[in-house]
Amino acid sequence: MTISYDKQKKLHFDLTNVGLRAQATAVGLVQLCHELKRANVLDDTALDRIKDAIADEVSVTAPRSLAAKGYRGEIRGRLDRLFDGEQHVGPADALAIGRPLD
């Protein structure tokens, strides 16, 4: 199944907004997870572990000025919406990037 150019472009920007790099690989990973879930190879628990691993890796690169726990939570929420495929992830400026710690 090939997705439309507009959907592909939106996915590209959503992946960028989440903070993932190597968008082509990330798109393939998201699609692979969709396909494996559809084939009943992956369950929700397995997908949660995949998203947790991604969130952990992205949060490791958080600037020191961010609260790591809060940043990771924001990333994990964005990953949930991205993997869901239905909800708009939103711009990266909605993340706490660059905000000083309270």
Image (tube, helix red, strand yellow):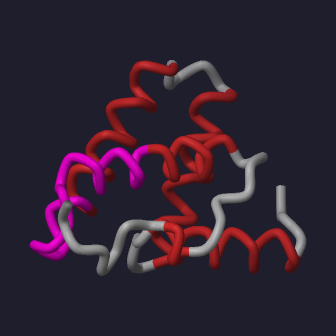
Q: State the residue at coordinates (51%, 77%).
A: 93
Q: Which secondary structure type mostly characterizes the magenta part of the structure?
A: helix
Residue farthest along the left direction in this orientation = 64
Q: State the residue at coordinates (78%, 46%).
A: 86
Task: Indicate left or right for 53 with 4 as reference.
Answer: left
Q: State the residue at coordinates (87%, 77%).
A: 6
Q: On the image, which quarter does residue 75 sit in?
A: bottom left
The magenta stretch spans which residues? 59-76
Residue 20 colored in magenta in the image? no
Nearest the eye: 62 or 100: 100
- Relative to 70, residue 48 above or below: above
Classify the position of the N terminus by image quarter: bottom right
Residue 65 colored in magenta in the image? yes
Nearest the eye: 67 or 3: 67
Horizontal and vertical percent position of residue 88? 73, 57
- Relative to 40, residue 84 above or below: below
Q: State the residue at coordinates (26%, 45%).
A: 53
Classify the position of the C terminus by image quarter: bottom left
Nearest the eye: 94 or 28: 94
Q: On the image, which quarter does residue 47 sit in?
A: top left
